[in-house]
Amino acid sequence: MKNKLKYFAYVTLMMTALSCADELDKVTPKIAPGFSALSGELGISYFAKGAVYINGFGGTYTTIDDGLGTGFHILVYGMHESMGDAIFAPWGNNNFKFLDNPTDFKFDDGHVSTMPIGTTQPFETKLRNNRSFGATNNMLVEWTYMYALNNGMNIILENVDKTVFGGDAATKKAALKAWAHYWKGYAYSRIGSMYVSGLVIDKSFTTAGDFVPSAAIIAEAKNQFDQAIASIGGITSAADYAALFANIMPDYVLEKGLPTTAAWIHNCNTMKARNILANHKISALTPGPLPAMTPADWTEVRTLTAPGSGIAASDGVYVIKTTDNPANSIIDPFFGAVGPYATTNDPTYFISEKLLQDYRAGDRRVAQNFDLLPSPQINIRGRGYNFGSRWFLTDAGTGAFPATYTYSHIEESGVDSHYMTASWEENQLMQAEAIVQSGGVVATATALVDAVRTAQGAGLAAIVPTTAAAALEEIRSERRAALLFRGVAFYDARRQGIITDKSSGGGRGPGGALNVPGWDHETNQVTPGAVVLHETTFVNRNAFINYNYLHYWDVPQNELEYNAPKAGSSVVVSPN
């Protein structure tokens, strides 16, 4: 994207944040005020803004620009939503045509079709984890953004104690330290939840070959969130905190106002809970190589997300919004995120049939947000049967239920919240799941699901709980709807065993890890298995999908060629 915030001159200090040596040589900042700019309150404030919103989310890096678009919310969230089968992208850019391409399908009539353009997703994505494939290497994208973000936060921590502040200097220093630790926690959360191993880097513009396993990266994420909470405790002047953050979080990125110190702590706790869920399978019976959730894990999630601990409905959270002035927009003002990219009947990202079947019959979010394509798309470009759908996401909704939550507004700036971290809805649903899994009152859990549905205007009757299993299915279904485009779809598919190969019990449909009835919102009938379109059998409603996706990605070869693992490092290649 060409548009950048006018204040982001300071961000050029750290545009070399990529850890690979060859990238460091290519960067020539257009404006380089130098580190002396960080000695003043205004300079470090603007840097704190740019280091997060541009370098971590909205920025453009040539090494990962493959012509599909740039920005964390387009590429990284797009990858997660597609591998979680909420959307699909049949294009070769950034390797999507292999990234979200299952190994095989079994249709209603019993015939099996395999991936027509390759072998398996693990093989094809690992093959392209090579510098010779350039920006096509999907494994490079999330790594690039998150280590750029981490580097910027290291710069803040290295300079904040030398900065001259007006007003309550102790409050402002504490707030900036909390900001840095919070986003370091987020960066490590993403790295640890996606890569088989990673690097803990606490000094700017440096790297090391000490690779540690994903679990250690997640532990470091928790450590950073805990340090953020400790620093938040040093914010004693609300007025000085607000004055400082007026230059870091402008009005147009606020949802429910600037997060209070209590809300900020709640955000930290909800992210810690997400990390536990995202990196464990639900139980020992769930297919896949992830460690199983233990009673202690469920108790911790329940504690972290409990009222007064996790994000409340009134809490400010961290989002990106577009602005009326495109020159000030952090992301492309029209198509800067995965939701807008999936909008209109000629989209870049298509809506998955498996997403639609997970909405309950009569859910107003379907009628308000989705409509039928002029012609169904089936096996686009002959690249596979995952690339087919009858549905598209409407711009600003259909108008069927105007009071219902509407996912995408490409012509109206500032309406959509593109979530950077967690949300109240996610916290509610994690709390609900933890209550059921830890043996709590099922009706208490389903009431939390009902609250989310009510808040989004789903128009569904209150859940009448029967069994714990039935309640858990309502929670799973609601996560698909309420958390759409918030970057957690892949985590859910992985922890539920859906992406695991069928030989180990994975997949969706008869005999798979997920085999529950859904709903066809066009014909108003039950879908016993997965919905998959075919040229001759048309709408298959009892199909089986063998996704067989990687559970964690390899470390990008772009990193390894310039930063070889030291002796004793963790493995840098995922086992499957």
Image (spheres, rainbow, N blue to C red):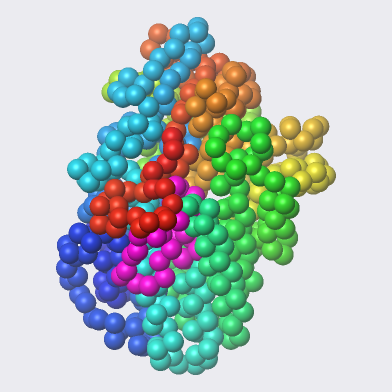
Near-viewer residue (429 or 198)? 198
Q: Is 33 contained in the magenta span?
A: no
Q: Quadrant of the N terminus?
A: bottom left
Q: Is residue 417 above or below residue 375?
A: below
Q: State left or right for residue 468 relative to residue 522.
A: right
Residue closest to the far front: 567
- Residue at the image point whose x is 38% and y is 72% from the top: 203
Residue 215, placed above or below residue 292: below
**Total count of labels:** 0
- Seen at 49% across and 57% down, the residue is 217
Residue 69 in picture, x, y percent from top left? 28, 47
Q: Residue at x 56, y 66 (%)?
A: 223
- Is 210 magenta? The answer is yes
Percent x, y for residue 93?
A: 27, 39
Which contiguous range is marked in magenta? Answer: 183-212
Apparent side of residue 439 relative to residue 558 in the rendered image (left or right): right
Q: Is residue 52 visible?
A: no
Query: Residue 523 location, x and y as percent?
Result: 56, 18
Q: Position of residue 286 (x, y in %)?
A: 62, 33
Q: Could you tell me which residue is drawn at 58 percent across and 82 percent down?
A: 235
